[in-house]
């Protein structure tokens, strides 16, 4: 077993950070190599729920072990090269959110790959993914702050109007 920790401060409230973190459809936007999420069983807000993260032809079955919206989520994941648990905590800090993520790998091969993913901040590394996530959430928080109260998010229909075509 090997343990790896990464942390960042996001200029957005915990509710926004947690909601984006747990939006499975958005994983490809910030997790390197993710091509989709399938086999969803249960709610993201419930321990015991499961889903499979796809990395091309490689699959990583994942189970939610614990969740407390918007403060904490712990999952167990695994495939041939990387398996273990991820424990993520979201704490309000200075008008933003401190995200602390801990990976605990299982097995010799996972420990080696965990070490590779823990080194540096390249795209696909633990730190690189967390920083990509931070930029994504901060960009959306800034866009949302520029909207007037009651104004729909970009791409959303105004109340009482049909949804724009192509969506």
Image: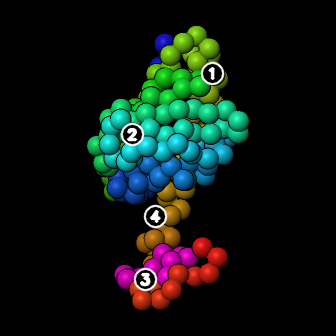
Q: Which residue is mark 3?
A: 151
Residue found at the very far bottom of the displayed protein:
160
Residue found at the very far right of the displayed protein:
57
Q: Is residue 99 visible?
A: no
Q: Magenta-highlighted stretch: main secondary structure?
A: loop
- Residue 82 placement: quadrant: top right
Compared with 139, 116 (above or below) is above
Ranked by sequence position, the earlier of labels 4 and 2 is 2
Residues drawn in magenta = 148-157
Q: Which of the labelled discs sits on residue 49, or is there none?
A: 2
Q: Secondary structure at mark 4?
A: helix
Measure the alpha-carbon separation of dots 3 and 2. 35 Å
Q: Secondary structure at mark 3?
A: loop
Measure the alpha-carbon separation of dots 1 and 2. 21 Å
Measure the alpha-carbon separation of dots 3 and 1. 47 Å
Q: Which residue is mark 4?
A: 141
Q: Which of the labelled discs sits on residue 15, or is there none?
A: none
- Residue 96 placement: quadrant: bottom left
| 1 and 2 marks in contact (CB < 8 Å) | no
Identified at 35% across, 44% down, the residue is 90
């Amino acid at each position: 077993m090997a343990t790896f920790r990464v942390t960042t401060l996001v200029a957005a409230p915990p509710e926004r950070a947690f909601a984006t973190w747990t939006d499975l459809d958005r994983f490809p936007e910030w997790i390197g190599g993710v091509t989709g999420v399938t086999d969803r069983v249960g709610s993201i807000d419930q321990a015991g729920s499961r889903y499979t993260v796809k990395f091309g032809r490689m699959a990583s079955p994942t189970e939610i072990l614990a969740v407390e919206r918007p403060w904490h989520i712990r999952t167990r994941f695994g495939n041939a090269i990387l398996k273990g648990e991820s424990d993520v905590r979201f704490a309000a800090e200075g008008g933003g959110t401190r995200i602390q993520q801990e990976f605990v790998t299982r097995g010799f091969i996972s420990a080696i790959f965990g070490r590779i993913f823990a080194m540096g901040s390249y795209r696909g590394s633990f730190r690189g993914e967390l920083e990509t996530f931070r930029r994504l959430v901060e960009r959306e928080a800034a866009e949302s702050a520029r909207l007037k109260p009651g104004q729909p998010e970009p791409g959303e229909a105004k109340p009482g109007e049909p949804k724009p075509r192509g969506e």
